[in-house]
Image (spheres, coloured by chain):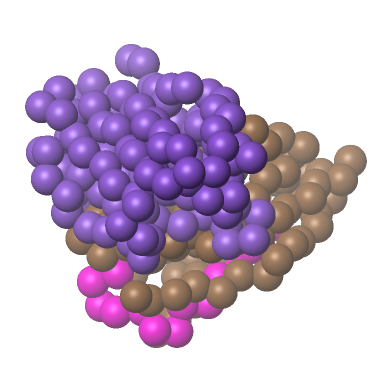
Chain colours: A brown, B purple
Amino acid sequence: DAKTTQPNSMESNEEEPVHLPCNHSTISGTDYIHWYRQLPSQGPEYVIHGLTSNVNNRMASLAIAEDRKSSTLILHRATLRDAAVYYCILTYSGYALNFGKGTSLLVTP
Amino acid sequence: KAGVTQTPRYLIKTRGQQVTLSCSPISGHRSVSWYQQTPGQGLQFLFEYFSETQRNKGNFPGRFSGRQFSNSRSEMNVSTLELGDSALYLCASKVQSTNEKLFFGSGTQLSVL
């Protein structure tokens, strides 16, 4: 199964933009790129997903490289409530693969 | 609309016992998937059920099994518990099997002593 690679942790200041990278060099043409985040003591929650084009929603933006081998989740203005573990995963036909350990985002005031 | 409900929230078992966890998906959702989360391995896929049939399975031993009922509710069973089975077990649901977003429950924290 196609795998993703994310940094273990990142840090950001409150109200600044955050760019969370994800590498997926073995992605196939039918894999969608999904992002989820997990707050302490909660299950993961959906953030955004896309196939080829950049995507925006009220939570974040997803920038996908032209060759699709990497993507970046962009939080435009980080808040303390954005401190969470962020997972980048690939899905094929809706089949969600392993999430791995994700990136732990620390937001400091 | 109620979210994904998992019961029980916490569970303590001893080695060799078996355990059954329950998951009620969001109304109208027909796909239910299960995940195991541990500090060492992260969040790993166990299996997915759709319309009472197992569609996909992760790389876990046969001690881990599941089923889905006609009302889409799902149960997961682990037999002959081992210490390493201590984990947070998460259930997620979605409407069908296409590339939709998953809705997760809060999980069942299983401790094996």
Residue at the spot x=45%, y=70% of the render? A64
Q: Residue at x 41, y 34 (%)?
A: B19
The answer to whether residue B79 is left or right of residue B38 is left
Give the residue at x 26% y 42%: B66
Which quadrant is the C terminus of chain A positioned in? top right
Quarter-wise, where is residue A50 in the image?
bottom left
Q: Quadrant of residue B79?
A: top left
* Residue at the outermost front position: B16
Q: Is residue B36 left or right of residue A74?
A: left
Image coordinates for residue A70, horizontal then vertical, percent: 49, 77
- Give residue B26's position: percent from left, percent from top: 29, 25
Q: Residue furthest right?
A: A109
Looking at the image, residue A91 lies above or below residue B66: below
A26 part of magenta stretch: yes
> Which residues lie in the magenta part?
A17-31
Which of these two is toward me, B110 or A21? B110
Furthest residue toward top: B1
In terms of depth relative to the viewer, which is nearer, B27 or A106? B27
Q: Is residue A36 left or right of residue A21?
A: left
Q: Judge whether A71 appears above or below B74 on screen.
A: below
**Residue A20 located left or right of residue B37:** right
Specify whether residue A46 is in view: no
Q: Is residue B70 above or below residue A47?
A: above
Where is residue B35? Give x, y as percent: 42, 48
Camera sees residue B56? yes
Name the foreground residue: A76 vs B67.
B67
Residue A10 highlighted magenta (yes or no): no
Quadrant placement of the N terminus of chain A? bottom left
